[in-house]
Every structure is written in C-alpha cells, then in structure tokens.
Image: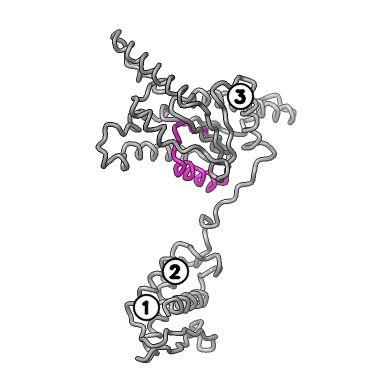
Amino acid sequence: MPLIILAGFPTSGKSTRARQLHKYLEERIQSQSQQSSSGGGSSSSAPPKYRLHLISDQSLSISRSVYDLSTLPAHVRSANASEKDARATIYAAVKRVLSDKDIVILDGLNYIKGWRYQLHCEAKAVRTPSCILQIGSGKDKAQKVNEERLQRQKDREAAGGEPAGDDEAEAPYSPENWENLVFRYEEPNPMTRWDSPLFTLVWDDDEAQTKQVFDGLWDAIAGEGRKIIKPNQATIQRSRDAGGDYLYILDRETQDIVKRILDQQSDEGGDEIVVPKGSGSGDETLSIELPAGKKVGLPQLQRLRRAYMGLNRGGIGLETVGNLSGPSRIRESFVRYLNDSFEADG
C-alpha cells in the first residue's frame, strides 16, 4: 500500500494532522474489514486488508536538534552529518515496512524535494503509490506557535520542572533553526510526479473539510481509481546466462575481439577488421571500421572495452539488445559499440 508523505513548515501542525489521518485510516480499514466479513456471511471479523504505520522523528527518537545548523561552522553546514544520519534512519524505517499491504504515514519536515523524490522512487520500486499531504500554514502563524512553545519551555524550566523536550512532538525549535528550516523549505509542486497527487489541509480547516480531504486521499491510494504502479525499466532484472557465466563470457568475447583488431590492423589505419560472429567457422562475420590515418593502440581498445563492460555489467542499455547471455549477441553489441566510438572520434 501507499506511502503518505506529510510536508509543511516546522510547527505548522503536521504531527496533529498525522495523528488525525492515522485515526481516520484506522477506522476506514476496520470498517472495510467488517464489510468484508458481513459480505462473506461470516460472524467473525475478517483480518484487516492493510497494515497501518505512523513513522516520525518522535517514533524513531530523533531529536529536533539534528536539524540545527546554527551551532555549526559555516564551512560544514552543507555537510550536516547529523541531519543526513537522521534521514538515513527514517529511510530505513520506511523501507522496512513499505509494501503493497502496508499504509505508511511519514510525519516529518520532508522539506527537500530530492528527499521526497527518493521516497517516491522507493515506493515505485515496490509497486505501491505515494502521495503528498501538505499542511498549509502561513509563516507568521507557524512562527507564533514556535514562540509560544519556546515561552512554555522557559516557564517550565524557570519553575524547576522537566524540560519541554520530554514530548518531542510539542518541543520548540530554536529561533535560528526555525528560520533556517523555513528558508530551506521546498514547497511541493503537483506538476512533478514525485509530488503528485498532492492534497492540502490548511490550519483553519474544520472537521468536515478535513474528512473530505482524507476521503479524497483514500480514494487515490486505496479506492477503485488507484493507479497501477509500474517499476522503472532500469529496476527490472534482466536475464542472464543460466549457468552464471555471463561476466566471464562478456570478458572473454570482448577480449577476443580486441586481440583480433590488434592482429589484423595495419600501421596506416583505416582498416576493415572482420571478426566471426560466433565461435564456429561457418558463422556470420562482423565488420569493424577503424579510423583512417591512425593506428588504434591497445590502451585505447582496452579503455573502450572497459567502458562497454561497465555499461553492460549491471544491465544498463540492455533494452535495445535483448538478452546478452549468448556470445554472438555480446560480440555483435560490442562491435556496434566500437564502430560508434570510432565514428565519433573521427
């Protein structure tokens, strides 16, 4: 099931909306389970069709101080290791539970569009949809909430009580950290595939409007209109030699062609090198057109061979040549690659 990513300014009410959404989905899943039971004539409730998860900084015990760059020297702010570690922890938690049977609500800042794209790709890899729930709040309103939390924290500490950080969901950000996070916030754009579909709730939306947005979100991720997610072609495992010798064959055949070029070419260059397409003597032949006026040396050929092997070692580029497990297909593809390279150099 899908990944629901919350986004918005810090202290804009994301955690409150995340809890409301979790309660709504919990009731919706339970209602769906009861309807399935009554439809089947069973007296006991059917097992829920989906599992529900709420992941946040608080659930993973990540302090808000990891996002504070104000205490770091200017030359290391762009490489804030604590923030990157926090995102890695969140990413691992999402990846661990994300599947077509799980609904994952990710409550957090999620202010970087590259981060949202990474999460979108992870959902797509497991063929489940993702969507964005943006919590709209004006900067002044969100800042006022943070200032009120800062004041409550000061009052509590002055009274000798526990620091306000005992509840991270209600903990304030330092003023410098808050301003920095707002400045760095990249608003979701529904025109991009990783920020679509985009649902929005504003601070003043009442219960009826909230339910309407949640209903639309449910229809998009679990209703009849839910899109069929197809993984990227690059993530589909290509076929390989059944015996597991693909890399050995790739190395052997390309090395053989390089050797034949060195043996047959003349010092003047511009030769047409003929190599067999397969290992048998009666097989078809392939032609390699060497650049005119210069001899192709071993370093250049080995460089091209390594580049070709790097492209085909992990399945990149196999869409156009199909299954490369056979030696003849490898030789044909490598010859084509060499001819293209020599033509580009010429």
Looking at numbered disc 2 in the image, what kind of residue is underneath it? Asp
Sequence-first disc among 3 and 1? 3
Of marks 2 and 1, the one in the foreground: 1
Residue 164's spot in the image, x, y percent? Answer: 35, 17
Residue located beneath label 3 in the image: 210
Residue at image point 51% right, 47% down: 121
- Residue 270, compared with residue 15, is above or below; it is below
Quarter of the image with the C terminus is: bottom left
Question: Residues under labels 3 and 2: Cα distance?
Answer: 58 Å
Residue 317's spot in the image, x, y percent? Answer: 50, 65
Residue located beneath label 1 in the image: 301
Sequence-first disc among 2 and 1? 2
Q: Which is more toward the observer, 172 or 275?
A: 172
Question: Residues under labels 3 and 1: Cα distance?
Answer: 64 Å
Of marks 3 and 1, the one in the foreground: 3
- Residue 84, compared with residue 202, is above or below; it is below
Looking at numbered disc 1 in the image, what kind of residue is underneath it? Leu
Residue at image point 54% right, 31% down: 52
Q: Quadrant of residue 31?
A: top right
- Residue 306, compared with residue 238, is above or below; it is below
Q: Quadrant of residue 299?
A: bottom left
Q: Is residue 233 covered in magenta?
A: no
Residue 303's spot in the image, x, y percent? Answer: 36, 73
Residue 245 numbered tag = 2
Q: Residue furthest top?
A: 159
Label 3–label 2 contact, CB within 8 A: no
Q: Secondary structure at mark 3?
A: helix
Range shown magenta = 105-127
Residue 5's spot in the image, x, y percent? Answer: 51, 35
Left or right of 83, for residue 196: right
